[in-house]
Image: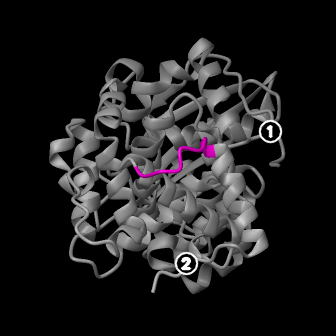
Amino acid sequence: MASRRSTGDFLEIACDEAGHTGPDLLAKEQPFFAFASINIGDAEAADLMAAARRLHPVQMPELKAAKLLSSPRGRKLICTLVQKLEGRFAITASDKLLALCGWVFEYIFEPVFQNDPRIFYRKDFHRFVAMFCYTYAIGMDEHAEGFLAQFQAYMRTKNPAVAPLLFEFKDTSEAASLRPFSLLQIFATGFRDVIAADNASVVDRMADGGRWMLDLSASSLWSHLNHWGKQRVPLSVQCDDSKPLRAIAGDLGGQSQEQIIRRIREIVGVDEPGWELVGPIKFVNSKSHASVQIADVLASTAASAFQHGLHEDMRSITTILDAGMLRDSVFPDIERLDLRNRSAAVNYAVLYELAMTASGKGTGLPIEVYYRVAENGFDTGQFRLNLD
């Protein structure tokens, strides 16, 4: 946990992001998104920046990581800031392609089990789905790129007709139905009407009318509020101006906040999540707010490091940056697909059962019971999977 720097009875938190492409997560020129928060006020941040500039003079009125990273002096300035702020910042970063695949579970599977999807999260089924979609998307299959483009278009329009790869699948061979992505297609096609109806209602359930539902800013901010909220001190938060965050800012306090926290507790399994704000989140211009400017430098440095690697003369801050990374960051974990592992094998069996249920051929067992059967079968050696 970061050391606490407070003003009176609250923590001052500044936030900014990098690699933002809105709800378009397929932008190849910016494959990573990063969000940074820092426990510092503007006055202290201005003093810190002034001291770093004296050590490493740079000719720019506002610090921008892209320019700083392009020169030895700029990189030294970033290292100085990071070293001085050790333990006082948090960063989340996401592989956007995998993040988009992560939404597949929430908007394809969860609508069918909306009354109680918790078992899937407890069993890491959502991560299993995300990873097999990810490996499919980066593979050589001719339909791979089209699948995610269609899914993203569907989420923007809520019209299943724009995603025939998901919602108009025709199972023409028995072997195809054994492949994970074919099983996803069978499930989505079989429950098309249920899925479409639930996702269409997003407009009424979300403050932004679903416009930014694939945007990573909101989920990142929730993670950071929860991180700092664990210190049980009210938060005074300011962020660089952001349309997606403005759209959901009203949900981060009062009854709406309680609903979000309850969902985090049920789905993510965070112990005692929550935060308290001393007032509405403030949206400011980083140019005139030193704390947000430093948060921007941290976020941009992280995004650049994941895309291009960290320059060798910045190796001294690697450990510090790693310590500030939150577990909510989204990166591939291929072990989730290793069918020699109990979790992966069982989740594959569950995916098969869900697809068969969608096509009217399932066992009819409640999903909790099916999980127990599959787990017992794996433990006793009664079933093994062979996809060759």
Q: Is residue 23 visible?
A: no
Callout 2, which amino acid? Answer: Leu
The foreground one among 293 and 252 is: 252
In screen coordinates, is 190 left or right of 116? left
Give yes or no for contact between labels 1 and 2 (Cβ–Cβ under 8 Å).
Answer: no
In screen coordinates, is 15 left or right of 97? right
Determine whether 77 is above or below 233 in the image: below
The foreground one among 3 and 59 is: 3
> For the residue carrying disc 2, how many other residues have a C-alpha within 10 Å: few (<14), some (14-19), or many (20+)?
some
Q: Which residues are magenta?
A: 361-367
Determine whether 18 is above or below 385 in the image: above
Instruction: State the CA–CA distance, disc 1 to disc 2.
Output: 33 Å
The foreground one among 247 and 291 is: 247
Determine whether 369 is above or below 175 in the image: above
Secondary structure at badge 2 equals: loop
Dominant secondary structure, magenta: loop
